[in-house]
Amino acid sequence: MTKKTILSASVPTGVLTVGNYIGAIANWSAMQEKYNCLYAVADLHAWTVHQDPEMLRKRSLSFYAQYIALGLDPEKNILFMQSHVKEHAELAWILSCFTSTGALNRMTQFKDKSQQHAKNINAGLYTYPVLMAADILLYQANLVPVGEDQKQHLELTRDLVENLNGKFGDVFTMPDPFIPKLGARIMSLQDPEKKMSKSDENEKNFVSILDDPKKIMKKVKSAVTDSGSEIRYDENNKGIANLMTLYSAFSGKDMPTIEAEFDGKMYGHLKVALGELICETLAPVQEKYHDLIANKDHLHELMRSGAEKARERATKTLASVYDKVGFYRV
Ligand code: ATP
Ligand code: MG
């Protein structure tokens, strides 16, 4: 049986957090044996909101190195920069001609982001879901790991597949959402009602995977908790539940084991133990990251080879699409 293809991408804004790690990347490295995996640093998507060019360049390289440091093997996966494969933009154009403005008007992320960036409601922000559809369809991906926030965009992709396959015969593989087994949702440290996010303006809300141990301890110790003292998992006590979820994800222990371990102890004990556990887990990741980032030539080599492998698939799909829609070929 041929392996299924998975595509996932992350926009290089901010620094990856322990939320991204637990919710996404820890699963990615577990999937690399079972599936054909492609992971992109989605730099084209970044410009839907304003960017500082030098910062974007730096972050893109950093994200690429973070992927590898977090366990994605560039030999087993295709790791690439979206802008290195020009077919993304080309396919997005074709797809945009088959997407109604009515459908784009219904996208809740567009509505949310237009409010957040009221001074820069650009056409790219509006057509973002079309570019995302191109990312997925170029590689004939069977599965796409999506969080709650991306479900609507995947639906739009599926509608495009139905529409184009109906008109032109089988051009694209129908992608399904991939919901990983593991993958707790990690909440913000200062406001456990909302999710931890790498683009959060308040850096106390997240632990980034590149934070030094001092910073990690400080952020975890100052995490907001309720006024109770017993360490019991209760979804209503969001702060302590979040710290326990983190502890569970990083230690592999289940909640009853954690409750027993901290029986009779205070919140402070859990915070210190969790902080130390995160530091310990991230130490080798950070070491690997710093080695990687110190050798740009090597990273560039990996990027070139990743892009080449991605392009091999992308050109095939695009050629077939160009053919079907009637572009003159010589
Ligand atoms: P942004 O604020 O830029 O949207 P983000 O932290 O939400 O950043 P994304 O690039 O949107 O990150 O998502 C990357 C991956 O990380 C997705 O698979 C998403 O489901 C996962 N993810 C993001 N935040 C969390 C979280 N708090 N807990 C678990 N998984 C998360
Ligand atoms: Mg997000």
Image (cartoon, grey):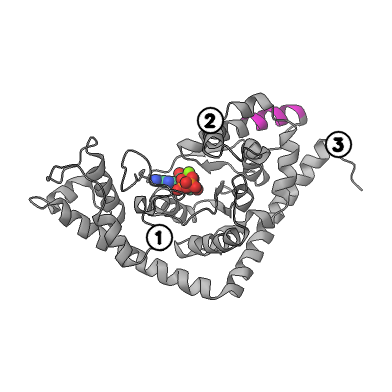
Dominant SS of magenta comes to: helix
- Amino acid type, label 1: Ile
Label 2, on which residue? 108
Instruction: Kindly give the residue lying farthest to the top in the view shown.
Output: 102
Residue reaching furthest to the right: 330
Direction from residue 176 to residue 250 in the image, left or right:
left
Q: Secondary structure at mark 1?
A: loop
Position of 328 relative to 289 (above/below): above
User: In this rendering, does residue 317 appear at all?
Assistant: no
Q: In terms of sequence position, does the residue under pointer 1 or pointer 2 come before the other?
A: 2
Element assignment for label 2: helix
Please tell me the numbered disc located at residue 326: 3
* Residue 131 sits inside the magenta stretch: no
The answer to whether the beta carbon of the residue marked 1 is less than 8 Å from any atom of ligand 1 is no
- The residue that appears at 52% across and 65% down in the rendered structure is 65
Residue 101 picture quarter: top right
**Residue 264 placed where, x, y %?**
7, 50
Report the Cα–Cα distance between label 2 and label 3.
34 Å
Q: Residue at x 63, y 61 (%)?
A: 306
Q: CA distance from mark 1 to mark 2?
A: 29 Å
Which mark's residue is nearer the viewer, 2 or 3? 2
Calculate the distance from the C-alpha at mark 1 to the C-alpha at mark 3: 48 Å
Residue that mark 1 sits on: 209
Where is residue 35 drawn, in percent x and y? 53, 51
Identify the magenta region: 159-167
Q: Amino acid at mark 3?
A: Gly
24 or 46: which is nearer to us?
46
266 to the left or right of 147: left
